[in-house]
Image (cartoon, grey):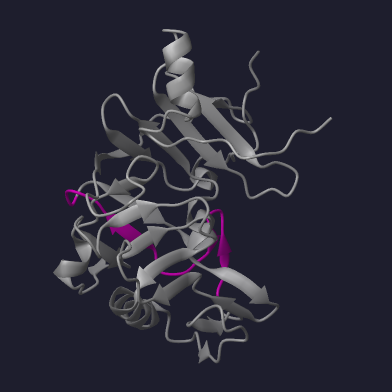
Amino acid sequence: SMITGIAGFGHNSTISIPNQLASLDSKFSRKFGICLSSSTRSSGVIFIGFTPYNVYKPMIDISKNLVYTPLVENTFTTSKFSEYHVKVSSIRIAGKNVPLNKMLKTKQGVGGTRISTTTPFTILHTTIYDAVKTAFINALPKNVTVVEPPTKQFGLCFSSKNIRNTNVGPDVPVIDIVFHKKSAFWRINGTNSVVQVNKDVMCLPFVGQDQTRAPSIDIGGYQLVENLLIFDLPHKKIGFSSSLKLQQTSCSKYEKTS
């Protein structure tokens, strides 16, 4: 029968599955990969250890060519044993830097960036969200009309009538999350940067929120779908792929091993 439940993967938690396995058997390392599927028939896959992270159709190791950034410690959070934080130095939309408040990018107190698979959509501090929203509007093609959001969940929506589809989703301005240096960035394409809310309207699935004593950027599950994340705890770093659709594969096409 199908078993359901919650599995712990906190980096310093004693109940974390990678930590428990590593303590029981030396062949297991404190390294794991998460790949969330967009398919309703598959929830994706978790890879544990240093083995090849293979998917098929085509058969490739999707752990190749990732962008790595160091894990950082947010000394303010009360959940530092279970959370994963990284440094974001800037955000680019269509190749242009978005002006951000530098105080909101620190790892102390209100600031920093957290990876959260339990958050449905990426949450941005209001000042960051407003800047991203403005930059995204300015980067949209001139024949795309901004419309009143049909749902209160999102603050920016627009007509999808003049937006063509590509192998990585709608052809909208790309969003680059730039980590500790300019060359280390994670690209978010249309498949993760917009959501179709009805036949004629798309929305930017980011949420603006004044967050007290919380990260100013909380990267959510929708933006992580069909992306491989590798948590390399021995080397204190996280690796990001861009959408696996660029490689014409997905998180649901993983190689099953015994």
Horizontal arrangement in the rendering, residue 22 relative to residue 216 (left or right) = right
Q: Nearer the viewer, residue 59 or 154?
A: 154
Which corner quadrant holds the N terminus? Answer: top right
- When asked about the image quadrant of residue 256, the answer is top right
Q: Is residue 170 magenta?
A: yes
Residue 82 screen position, x and y as percent: 40, 41
Query: At x 50% / y 50%, what residue is drawn?
Result: 117
- Which residue is most to the bottom? 148
**Residue stretch rendered in magenta on the structure:** 163-182
Name of the residue lying farthest toward the top: 26
Q: Residue at point 20% right, 74% down?
A: 99
**Membership of 160 in magenta stretch:** no
Pick whichever, 249 or 148, lies toward us.
148
> Could you say which is closer to the camera, residue 88 or residue 11?
11
Q: Nearer the viewer, residue 83 or 100?
A: 83
Query: Does the magenta stretch mainly form a helix, a strand or a loop?
Result: loop
Q: Quadrant of the C terminus?
A: top right
